Amino acid sequence: MRFSLKRLTLILVATVVVLILYLICIVNFDDMSAFYQDLLIHDRYDDRSFKNSDSIIRQEFHYSNYLFEGYDNFTALYDNDIERVQSLPLNEKCKAFFDQHELYNPEWAIDLWRGDIKFEKNINHKKMFFKSRSDILKEQKSAKGESDEITRIDNNTINEEFKNSYKASKIAEQGMADTITLMRLYGKCFVNNENHEMNDIYQKYSNKLFPFLNTHALPTFERLTQQGDRLFGDNILPVFHTDNQFTGQTVLYDPGHDNLIDFLHKNTSGKGIVISAANKHVRDLIKLIRVLRALNNRLPIQIVYNGDINTKSRRIIELVATRDIDFLLNPGMASEHLDVLPELKLLEQYKDYGSEFPPQDIWLVNIKFSIEKQEKQSFPKYSNKLLALLMSSFEEVVLLDADTVPLVPIIEFFESDEYKKSGTFFFKDRSLRDHNDYIETNYFSKLFPINEKSMDTLFNIPLVTNKTMSNKYMTGWRHFQEAGVVALQKKDHFLPILMTLPLSYWRDPARSSIWGDKEMYWLGFAMSGDESYEFNEYSAASVGELTKNSTYAFYPNTTSQELCSTHPGHVDKNGKLLWINSGFSFCKKNGSFRDRLNFPFSIFEAEELNQKYSKPLQIRAAIIPPDLPNLREPFNPIDDTPELDFMESWTHRHKDMDELDNRRIEDYGPQKGWMHNPNCQGYFYCAYNQIATYNLTNGNGLDEGHVFEFDEESTKLFDYLGKIWITGNVRTEPRARPVKPTPQSTVQITSIDTSKQAELSSTQHALIQDSPFTQQSQRMPDIPEVVQQEPAEDISSEEESSSLMNKLTNVLDKSKIPKEQQLSESGNEFLGMILADLVVSPARSQQYATEEQEW
């Protein structure tokens, strides 16, 4: 075949054109769909192709592309005249919308998204997706004895899985966003609006949106008083005066007539404290109640539980809440009265601190039967807080965690400027350098009323503003809200509470994108189109004692001040410390023996370290590290180049001590405001008020935080409240602390049956008395017991009883004792811990004494 010059020229031109088009296709991803692009490059699995795919995914998933599925059908009712729709009376629009929704979606119900269609959080990280699937495939091949090499066929298979995940994620995200849009319209039309003509639709969609609520049963309300407990009847809600005292009146819920959501919304009354708790929280709970009494709290308290507070726990709660001061502060109640701040004699000095210890008005609220049985597993445990907020009967609530310690009267949260302005008072978390992902903030943006073309604008629902979109979470940081204290006017902000519920049972990407319930409160507001919420000015502080001696400092040669603690605290705009989290113990994990090997405790004397761990936290100062700059700009920009550049700049900074094996760094100062530390089982954080700047144009400058050193009056109050908290292990009646005998003497064991007595060596008795496990000892009728602290927490389950019996058996067979316990320096201590865990019978006490002597 002959080729003329002309023909060769045409072939060459055609080849060049095809090549140019191909290059355009490869480079110009912004104009192509991810699915189509993957078809073009199904055999290209290099970094560039992965990055291009990620860019397209971010664009396609961007919240600005979201539109409610029924939008076009609804506007078509009015010839797509948007201004006309907006001007219609609300009730007319509501009826038209819900009638049409019922017509097109008669079987609609909220979806938990736990079937085959799930959201893939790595959908905008294709390389990560491939690595995850490749690692699984390699393991499967190795298990079969095959080569673990990933072939082109394997990559093609993974790519098909990626495409399927892409489709499923689009469907799931659209479905979730549509559900939240529907909830906003439900709130606009019914919750925040009187629309009696549509009561049937209100009831129907209440059931559809909240199928886990048992509409036939309110929680049961039981009041604990000195005169005895009073259990109110079924479906009864107590009524409180404007002075927050119980009126004696109740409101009856009629399941056959009332709408549960409407009833809970309209029949709240008074101000009060709400705490979600179970048996396992009772030890912290009774200590919290003691602190509330010391702060002269007169607000009623509703303890909301899910059928998991038993009779013993209720009795202890009642004792602590209602008994007189002589009982509550009796030095015989706990050994800590003499061991901790012995110069501070609570029973003699409490009036010096203005304490009156009024009895507390305690209500136990059981929601066990208010949740449909088949739906109980849909909720993670922290969701009980959300349900407690919903089902408590107060109109105005301060929601507390059981391990929260308020340092001011609770009424001050209601009296704050923030609460008066908005009906809310929220608190910020530690400003940790822990980032979230584009797909997470974009997902939440899609749940907000944010787009002009939306059902929200048709129904005049306010769109979110920079207030929400520029907060720390939405600009790239994982931790924004601390939820140990949440103050909220429920009646005015009822829809935001309802909005939190879907987030608690949508695992991906909702629950997996936030830490427990921490971010759910402001998210509920934003999803409702309600930006009337206010945060405390400052982020969380590290509270305790400044590291004054450079010998104990992690950065000894820096001008930055250091404060290491397990406790975040919250300082208001006036420099007043309002509350701390994680109880009042120096370390709630009681790990001095374990931490003695870690700096700085490795240079402590043993007794000094034990004393530190056995005493309450000493609060003398607080450090709030510098705030972090935005990682991601507001409104979720598609281009991630600035974000990646910022994170890449971290690699050019010095490494901090939590990134190195070094226990100290002497050559430079801290690079981050918060440093994680392995002490106290990882609950230990060090905070710094000066760090190397994140401003890339500022060279060697410093970013500045805040240091607060508290005055003598404040620190005395903190010590007083700390001792009130730490001495909070109660019994049914106080007992005198036994005097430790001389080595030759014996110790009598008190007995419920006083005719029985037994003897222990003084060494054993001291071990039992001083063991941290004495708080977990268990009583049994007619069996002697070592003089010890009464447990605040129930430990009487069959499983735990079985565990105790196993320990009893094992102590008689040294071969069954873990090797690390045999090798420790405290064989005696181990025996004492076991004895403290068990009921010691007279018949076996001598046998244990023999074992102790042998060891």
Image (spheres, rainbow, N blue to C red):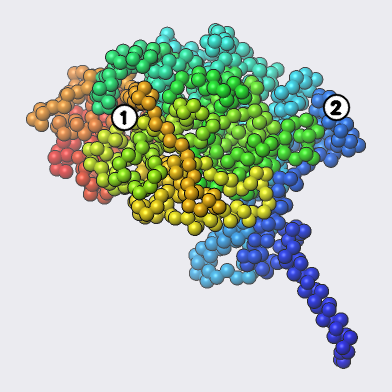
Residue 582: quarter of image: top left
Mark 1 or mark 2, earlier in chain: 2
Q: Nearer the viewer, mark 1 or mark 2?
A: 2
Marks 1 and 2, how far apart at CA: 66 Å
Asked if 57 appears above or below 743 in the picture, the reply is below
Q: Position of residue 795 (x, y in %)?
A: 37, 30
The residue at which mark 1 appears reads as 775
Near-viewer residue (574 or 268):
574
Q: Is residue 27 left or right of residue 384?
A: right
- Can residue 224 be seen here? The reply is no
Residue that appears at 80% across and 20% down:
197
- Residue lying at 19% horizontally and 31% vertically, measured from the top left: 766
- Judged from the image, the secondary structure of the residue bearing numbered disc 1 is helix
Q: Can you tell which quarter of the image residue 261 is in?
A: top right
Say which quadrant the C terminus sits in: top left
Q: Quick one: label 2, few (<14), some, or many (20+) residues within 10 Å?
A: few
In this view, 418 is above or below 687: above
Instruction: Residue 772: give x, y in percent of width and height.
Output: 29, 33
Q: Amino acid at mark 2?
A: Leu
Q: Position of residue 531 (x, y in %)?
A: 66, 31
Label 1: how many Cα within 10 Å (few below 14, some 14–19, many 20+): some
Q: Which residue is mark 2?
A: 88
Q: Amino acid at mark 1?
A: Gln
Q: Is residue 654 left or right of residue 529?
A: left
